[in-house]
Amino acid sequence: MKKKFILLVFSAVLLIAIVNLSFTNATDALEVTEKRKEVVEKVQGEAFTVEIGFKNIGKNEGKWNINIVFEGDTWSQEGNSQEIELKPNEGKTLSWTGTIPDDAPINTLARLVIYYEDSFKVLNWWILVVPGAELSITSSCVK
């Protein structure tokens, strides 16, 4: 009887530990603060700069035509195409500048996409259009 009781308690403790670990892992995977660092807030008409590092991980020299686009449901912004030529293991950083469209709706997002040759890569960088003006109440009075 004592062995059954010890086995039951051990099983209960093990079950609680498994449930706790699985809940902890699920919470960690959904952490919002990490993702918010990749959202850049800009106002309509504001300039932005994008810098991206590239490296040739192949065995031969390569040449690529690269462009970026911030793509969203209601607005987008395309950069100018740039050509890059790299030797094996050589790296280089390219930069683009752009401006948020004046008609980009407030509280809308656009995501950074890199296009090169016949491929593309979606990066986890976003621009959020925020209001350019904000009202603050500095005083009030009731008589």
Image: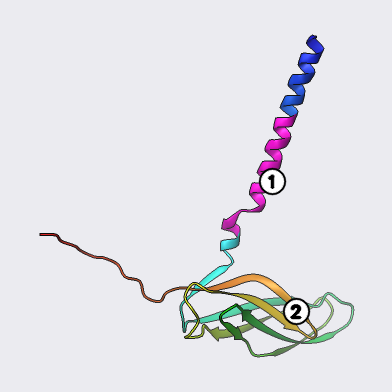
Name the residue carrying label 2. Answer: 120
Task: Identify the image quadrant of residue 19.
Answer: top right
Q: Is 81 part of what is drawn in magenta? A: no
Q: Secondary structure at mark 2?
A: strand
Within 10 Å of disc 1 (Cα), the crowding (few <14, some 14-19, many 20+) is few
Secondary structure under tag 1 reads helix
Q: Nearer the viewer, residue 42 or 87?
A: 42
Q: Are marks 1 and 2 in contact (CB under 8 Å)?
A: no
Q: Residue at x 73, y 25 (%)?
A: 12
Marks 1/2: CA distance? 31 Å
Q: Using the image, determine if residue 27 lies above or below residue 130.
A: above
Asked where in the image residue 67 lies, by quadrant, the reply is: bottom right
Q: Which residues are magenta?
A: 15-34
Question: What kind of secondary structure does the magenta stretch mostly adopt?
Answer: helix
**Is the N terminus in the top left, top right, bottom left or bottom right quadrant?**
top right
Give the colour scheme of this rendering: rainbow
Location of residue 40 in the rendering, given as x and y in whole percent from the top left corner: 54, 71
Residue 71 is situated, as x and y percent measured from the top left of the image, at 62, 79
The x and y percentages for residue 16 are 70, 31
Q: Amino acid at mark 2?
A: Phe
Q: In the rendered view, does 58 fall on the left or right side of 15?
A: right
Of mark 1 and mark 2, the one earlier in the sequence is 1
Displayed quadrant of residue 119: bottom right
Q: Residue furthest right?
A: 59
The structure residue drawn at horizontal position 68% and vertical position 78%, both measured from the top left corner, is 113
Residue occupying image coordinates x 76% and y 22%:
10
Disc ID at residue 25: 1
Disc 2 residue crowd, few under 14, some 14–19, many 20+, Cα 10 Å:
few
Q: Is 7 situated above or below 85? A: above
Residue found at the very far left of the displayed protein: 143
Query: Type of residue at label 1?
Result: Asn
